[in-house]
Amino acid sequence: MLSAREKELIAEIWDRLTPVAEDIGAEALLRMFATEPGSKTYFSHLDISPSSAHLRSHGKKIVLAIAEGAKDISQLAVTLGPLQTLHAYQLRIDPTNFKFFSHCMLVTLAAHMRNDFTPVAHAAMDKYLSAFAAVLAEKFR
């Protein structure tokens, strides 16, 4: 699925973006809420207005989970095990939302990274985020 170079590139990107995790995560969530308004239903108990503490906090959690998974992509299912259970059995998130979020994250990365988000980086990140979303959705089957 991912070459060794793609795995290295993904890990490098997330290492670089971890310091701005709140910004990246909040922006990606806002993009998802704007393009897929139904996804907001899972956040009805939180203030998800732009720059809210809830939005930034949750966005940071997501980005840090993505970055953690990028450290060893071969162990993604193990790394995401607790999140799989949480999202499937407690939060009961529709797995389609993981795909929506992945796409919004790609757009957000392109906006933040600009010229550094090369076609190679884009393709590698798309593969990784697709795998990330698929692993999160596995418990729903």
Image: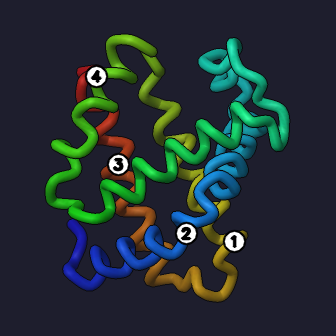
The amino acid beneath tag 4 is: Thr
Residue 71: quarter of image? bottom left
In whole angstroms, how far apart are the C-alphas of marks 3 and 2?
A: 17 Å
User: Is 76 placed above or below 82 here?
Assistant: below
Residue 51 location (% of width, % of height): 82, 43
Q: Quadrant of the C terminus?
A: top left
Q: Secondary structure at mark 3?
A: helix
- Camera-nearest residue between 80 and 104: 80
Real-space CA distance between mark 3 and mark 4, rounded to the nearest whole angstrom: 14 Å
- Distance between the alpha carbons at the discs numbered 1 and 2: 9 Å
- Residue type beneath disc 2: Leu
Q: Are marks 1 and 2 in contact (CB under 8 Å)?
A: yes
Q: Name the residue carrying label 1.
A: 112
- Note whether 121 is above or below 14 in the view shown: below
Q: Position of residue 130 (x, y in %)?
A: 38, 52
Which residue matches tag 3?
A: 132
The first of marks 4 and 2 along the sequence is 2
Disc assigned to residue 89: none
What is the CA distance from the residue labelled 4 to the residue labelled 2? 26 Å
The three-letter amino acid code for the residue at tag 3 is: Phe
Q: Earlier in the sequence, mark 1 or mark 2?
A: 2
Instruction: Measure the C-alpha gap from mark 1 to mark 3.
Output: 20 Å
Q: SS for tag 1?
A: helix
Q: Which mark is residue 17?
A: 2
Select label 3 or label 4 by which is in front: 4
Please tell me the numbered disc located at residue 85. 4
The residue lying at 31 percent from left, 51 percent from top is 131
